[in-house]
Structures are given as C-alpha cells and as structure tokens.
Image (cartoon, rainbow, N blue to C red):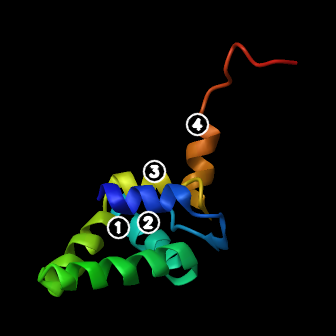
Amino acid sequence: MQCVVEVVKGSLPILDYVPTRTNEDLQQASTRIAGAYRRKSSLWNSYFRYARLKAQGLAWSDAEFVSAAERAFESTAFLEASCSVVLSDYALKRHQRRRAQPYVPH
C-alpha cells in the first residue's frame, strides 16, 4: 500500500473529474477514483508494469501481487492521497471542510 500511495503522491494531476453520487460510500468513491487514476496516469502504468516484471523475477505470485495492488486502491490511504491528483466530488467536499488557518499571510 505504501508503494501505491507514494506513486500517487508523485503523479502529476489527472485531467479528469470523477463525480460521486450522494449516497455513495467511501469504498465506492475510492473504486471510481482509482479507476480514473489507473486509466490516465502514465506514471502508475509505467511503475506497475516495471513492478510486475520485478515481482516475476523474484518468483512472486502474479495473482497475489495484482490482488495486493487492488486492495491498496480500495484503502482510505489511497483515497486521501488521490485528493491532490484526481479532482472529484470527494476531494472538493474534503477541501471545503478545512478550516481557515489563523496565520495566513495577507
């Protein structure tokens, strides 16, 4: 999971907007945002391709490697990291809830 979050943090912003439904829970929102990220991020696609090759070289199970990546994309850590990369209703709502800081230069 740490590798996925670090790759997301290093990504350039994704030019896509992911609307979330009003009754959608965090798990569903995370799945939709992750789908947009994986389709559009050239950094993720390059990293994942290279990581799979390295895992195969170490004789790791490919199915378990892919499953671990999927679980990471379903985590709250991914959802929080994706707010700075993929614009979504979740990210906008999260930004609106932040309180103004008292020590902002004017």
Residue 78, quarter of the rendered image = bottom left
- Spatial separation of the CA atoms under disc 4 and disc 1: 24 Å
Q: Is residue 85 above or below residue 37?
A: above
- Spatial separation of the CA atoms under disc 4 and disc 2: 18 Å
Where the N terminus falls, by quadrant? Answer: bottom left
Residue 35 point in image, percent of width and height:
46, 78
Between 32 and 20, the residue placed more toward the observer is 32
Q: Amino acid at mark 3?
A: Glu
Residue where numbered disc 3 is placed = 80
Residue where numbered disc 4 is placed = 97
Residue 69 point in image, percent of width and height:
28, 72
Q: Amino acid at mark 1?
A: Phe
For marks 2 and 3 on the same chain, the one whose residue lies earlier in the sequence: 2
Q: Is residue 104 above or below residue 54?
A: above
- Spatial separation of the CA atoms under disc 1 and disc 3: 11 Å
Between 50 and 92, the residue placed more toward the observer is 50
Where the C terminus falls, by quadrant? Answer: top right
- Spatial separation of the CA atoms under disc 3 and disc 4: 14 Å
Element assignment for label 2: helix
Image point (82%, 18%), residue name: 105
Q: Residues within 10 Å of mark 4 (few under 14, many from 20)?
A: few
Q: Amino acid at mark 2?
A: Ala
* Mark drawn on residue 29: 2
- Pointers 4 and 1 in contact (C-beta within 8 Å): no
Q: Residues within 10 Å of mark 3 (few under 14, many from 20)?
A: some
Between 43 and 94, the residue placed more toward the observer is 43
For marks 4 and 2 on the same chain, the one whose residue lies earlier in the sequence: 2
Q: Is residue 26 above or below residue 46?
A: above
For marks 1 and 3 on the same chain, the one whose residue lies earlier in the sequence: 1
Residue 42 point in image, percent of width and height:
56, 79
Image point (62%, 26%), residue name: 99
Is 1 placed left or right of 36 in the picture?
left
